[in-house]
Image (cartoon, rainbow, N blue to C red):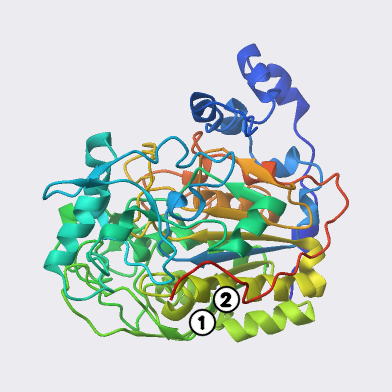
Amino acid sequence: MSTNSARRRNAGPPVLVTLLLVAGMVLAACSAAPPSRGTAQSVEGRRTAALAPAAAAHWTSVHNTTAGLHKIKHVVMIMQENRSFDDYFGTYPGADGLQGRMGTCLPKGNGGCLAPWADHADVNGGGPHDRRAFYADVDGGRMDGFLKAAIVARGHCADPNNPACSNNNGLDSMGYHTGSDIPNYWAYAKNFVLQDHMYEPNHDWSLPEHLWGVSEWAAVCKNRQAASCTNFHGQKQMGKAPANGFVGNGVVKLRKKPTYAWTDLTYLLHRAHVSWGYFVKQGTEPDCRSDAAVTCHKAYQSAVTPGIWNPLPNFVDVQQDHQVGNIAPTTTFLRDARTGHLPSVSWVIPSGQVSEHPPGRVSAGQSYVTHLVNTIMKGPDWKSTAIFISWDDWGGFYDHVQPPTVDSNGYGFRVPGLVLSPYARRGYLDHQSLSFDAYVKFVEDVFLHGERLDPATDGRPDRRPDVRENNPALGDLSYDFDFSQQPRPPMLLPEHPRTTLTH
């Protein structure tokens, strides 16, 4: 896949005349510094810093304001599974984590309580992580329902792979991993960027999260026309089976024919001649395709099979644009990374075995991600690449931060977020409010000069309720980069590091 030269063009300079006409208050906001992210901030200070700059609502593109953004030629989004921020980075120094909350004792629901505890087990269980579980865990803002939900779920489910279930007795939903358990992830945080307010884009399980990751929406459609799609409202649609077979707490019957009719990001990329690839590791899916199921067989996953983690083959516009061939095995991604042929935009999706989704091993996921990163870093494209690493949902694991309400769809719980690049800031803690919307926004700013998945302007209108990338509460990933610094060399890590994980 070739990268079109158009994506290398710099955006034009800001329109100064327009800026001069903006009200004084807005001018002051536009000149404001980016949010402070110093580790010495108080919790209240971090809450304030979590908001995007006031000027963000008035930016058409950071391409116009961030010198050097054009140095990024490749964006790689590595998505793992089912970990909350507190589960992996709750004890990371300076982060908005578990410090001061170790005595927080969450009720078990049947008497007694349990506080956060260091869990060094390589295989975890977590808890239910569908839409019902989100509301149960938040518990009206008390953030104390995680343990009870996990214990109850285990008592009513027989299949650990069902997103409505727990993989063990539920107690490890209050467990957290230390830096010695996941040394490579912590090394990336210490040497590059850790985001401690990265939220799921909506409060649900894997399929909606992956739909948001490629399209900024999760909807139900009556037919193959975008105008027939309506916003997914979860339990209001429970038990119904619309034409595309997607319901968050109902039936997921993925079909061979394309049935996601709304517009996804690849439509804009293809139209602008920007190369992209969606890379899927062959193996199994961990989640059942029905949230209501008690047991299920693990479904097979590959680049050519539509699935929970591979929704793009079911998008109508991907089929119409003849772009299905851009969905390829992970082996293709690794070859492209080694030879300097990465597409401009890449999504990299795991199989169940290396996803860290319970009961997948933490160590297996860390080794898999390290192999991906090392391969990129050793390749010719490292010098112009931005790597974003995150986990698609919280997996039922405890997180103490109540998600902000940005619109009717979300956000969901915090998940870890890492940024690796030759231009990434060193040892940087980003406290902005972010979600997977920020990844789409960054891609649009780097390669599309700020064009959005906006039904009013993208030429393929659908009925999405808002343009998430323009939400003023959303931070900006450009702050995680320093394009004035000398490009940083690769930081190669052992793919099988020594850990304190117990098998």
Q: How many marks?
A: 2
CA–CA distance between discs 2 and 1? 10 Å
Along the line of sight, the residue nearer the viewer: 448 or 132: 132
Q: Nearer the viewer, residue 292 or 278?
A: 292
Q: Nearer the viewer, residue 497 or 238?
A: 497
The label on residue 115 is none
- Give the mark nearer the N terminus: 2 vs 1: 1
Please name which of the two marks, 2 or 1, marks the residue nearer to the observer.
Answer: 2
Q: Please report the residue visible at 39 percent of the width from the left and 45 percent of the height from the top.
A: 411
Residue 226, compared with residue 414, is above or below; it is below
Instruction: Please give left or right for residue 168 compared with residue 63 in the image.
Output: left
Identify the amino acid type marked 2: Tyr
What is the crowding at mark 2: few (fewer than 14 residues within 10 Å), some, or many (at least 20)? some
Q: Are marks 2 and 1 in contact (CB under 8 Å)?
A: yes
Q: Position of residue 314 (x, y in %)?
A: 39, 75
Quarter of the picture holding the N terminus: bottom right
| Residue lying at the far top of the rendered structure | 24
* Tag 1: amino acid: Lys
Question: What residue does disc 2 label?
Answer: 368
Q: Which SS class for mark 1?
A: loop
Q: What's the residue at 37%, 73% (across, down)?
A: 308
Q: For the point 44% across and 49% down, which residue is it?
A: 86
